[in-house]
Amino acid sequence: MASQRAKQLAKKVVRYPEDQPPIVSCKDWIQNLTKDPKGFVTDYVSRLFPITRWITHYNVGWAAGDVIAGLTVGMVVVPQSMSYATIATLPVQYGLYSAFVGVMVYCLFATSKDVSIGPVAVMSLQVSEIIKYIDKKYPNRWSSPEIATEVAFICGFALLAIGLLRLGWIVELIPLPAIAGFITGSALSIIAGQIPGLMGITGFNTRAATYHVIINTLKHLGRTHKDAIFGLVGLFSLYAIRIGCDRLSRRYPRRARFFFFISTFRSAFVIVVLTFASWLYARHHKSKKGTYPIAVLGTVPRGFKAVGTPTIDHHLISALAPKLPVATIILFLEHISIAKSFGRINGYKIDPNQELIAIGVTNTVGTCFGAYPATGSFSRSAINSKAGVRTPLAGILAGIIVVVALYGLTPAFYWIPTAALSAVIIHAVADLVTKPPQVYQFWRHNPLEFFIWAAAVLVTVFSSIENGVYVSIAASAVLLIFRLAHPRGHFLGRVRVHSNGSPSDARDVFVPLSHNRVINPQIRVGPPPQGILIYRFEETFLYPNSSKLNSTIVDHVKANMRRGKDLRLIPLSDRPWNDPGPRRGVEYEWEENLSRPVLRAIVLDFSTVSQVDTTSVQALMDTRKEVERWTNRPVEFHFATILSPWIRRCLIAGGFGYEHSSRTHDVTGVVSYDASQAGPSQSDVETGETKGSLLPDPSYGEIRHGEASAVQIDTPYFHLDLAEAVAAAEAGLLTLTPQSSASPSVHKGDDKVDVVLG
């Protein structure tokens, strides 16, 4: 008994409406989440290891494709990994460590068969920036491999946590043009930084801003060394082989696969040939100082020399903190964008959360091998896909090739010309630059997104990759907020469409009244029934855009609908300051007002609204209040296509959707104020709320909407579609007394324009 009294008291305190229709509750939401906890846990655990879903179906046909793809990628990953390690300012063996762990671990957690994980150019460039930052701030305190390995551990752990918490949706907040922008800028920076190495030019900082590197390279062209012979020949050979194989594939399509493999092995072939040439030339020209006439790679330690328990230095983590966010962003953005691209091409869908877990585990485990951050590689993934990979197990073959290279080929690595590695880097990274046709597509799809791409490229080139990432993300966020805060919306009219010219198949289609270059301009759109406004949202309805909706509807009503109160009968001193009405003695303004239709109903199309909140519902309540103040009479608000029970709940809480005897009080007041407690003043005139002004006029009769609604009958102002909502509003007009001289008559069908679809 006491609990019942407490419950009644609580309802009284919060003004709980006893007469509102039944609505969805928080209890329903909790029950929906917990209706099958065992199934949820089972599904969660099984999704952590996607390999269990297909490994039992593995067969000889799949194995053949995986062997070919694995060997092909392995031949590419060895020279590329060593080259990318030089970008990161690390010894080349660390690139091989990262490549081994990436291809071996990823297959256990992958949801993409095509992606190949390992060192990549953009991340290597960022690692070099981080190492330069730490060395400048803490000179000689930590070695470059220690810094790179620590970055891999922290970023990997962060991505693993994001994936386990199923927060992979944050990847969707950054659009494609922003990703393409900073990747293009990074690629240009890498190319500019490798040209001095390609030409054998020294004497300046190749890690400076890109435009500085380009200027200094041009200034020091006179210092071009013999390395340029190896570098330029290697770069020319790489492009010659690729272009030649592409043309031969088009000329001899039956042998296209053969030419594909020849083209794929070009990097390994060029490295082998130039290494042999370097050995023939340089071994007999060693100076007294122990140097050679060209720069060679030098001694590469055999095997996994850095295997062991990773050392976590808390002081180093604190020093790395400012640089870790951008490194993490680059890792997951590049990987997810590549995985999605190949999923679209080859007809499968990836799980972003699982992919984050995969690269998180890869980088975390990689620290035990001394690896630096690794993520999905576009070039190797493309080769993997074209080679006919069938499952992620192809990475194991690539890993075996890396092991063979580490234990059997390290003596030969000594003679690899560094100019040849620069040629491999430039050749691989050039494909990351956004092509002109794709840039033009950005412009065609959305010019604003083109400017985001351009801003990301320019900032990356003229500042740093870190600033380029942040600028692209910030610009995307600004564009998203702008779109949400300034949504498009249209007042609608009607067009009657006859399918195949048959009158029996006629239906009403609601289209914008204003010309929008979508509707055929030769079709005249008829206005809605007199006394009814139809408005369609083109965005979800939340607090950033609630005020715009309010002002749009209220301004339209004041400009096109009749004012209900004759302000001529009110003394000037009693009129509201913000709406004084017509001047004394000026009759034509009131006559113009009388020529306008009387607003009876507003129909809101919610077909594109997926969310509402407290502020937006308060804006709707304010809209209703301002509209009824203008018309000096109740105005029906009809809502079409409300398919979410939570939107329905919000609107009902705001007093919409059902018959009720009094208006709901404000829900978002900054301070608590009850107007009913104020003494008599001119506020009644200023608000337009004189006694009885908001009560239905008995002369208009009773409105019956239950039979017109296809949704729950206890909310007759909520409708399944727009046609039903307009029909219900029209039915309300016909029910109201049409004899009133002040009310314009409604003639159904007079305001519709017929269109025949043949």
Image (cartoon, helix red, strand yellow):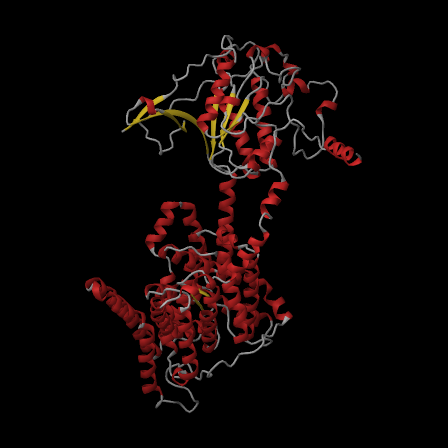
37 up-or-down from 463: above or below = above
Q: Residue at x 39, y 63 (%)?
A: 114
Residue situated in front as seen by the camera: 481 or 739: 739
Q: Could you tell me how many numbered marks the image carries? A: 0
Residue 152 percent across, percent down from the top left = 53, 68
Q: Which image quadrant: the N terminus?
A: top right
Question: Is 275 on the left-hand or right-hand side of 43?
Answer: left
**Residue drawn 42% across the image and 61% down it:** 112
Residue nearest the observer in this picture, 162 or 47:
47
Residue 279 x/y as whole percent:
34, 86
Q: Is residue 275 left or right of residue 174?
A: left
Q: Is residue 53 above or below residue 71?
A: above
Residue with the most extreme left position: 251
Is 225 placed left or right of 722 in the picture? left
**In this picture, residue 522 sits left or right of residue 88:** left
Look at the image and tell me whether residue 457 can be seen.
no
Query: Residue drawn 42% across and 91% down?
Result: 288
Q: Residue at x 32, y 83 (%)?
A: 276
Residue 439: tell me if it is visible. Answer: yes
Nearer to the camera, 213 or 411 = 411
> Where is the C terminus found, in terms of image quarters?
top left
Q: Position of residue 535 (x, y in %)?
A: 47, 28
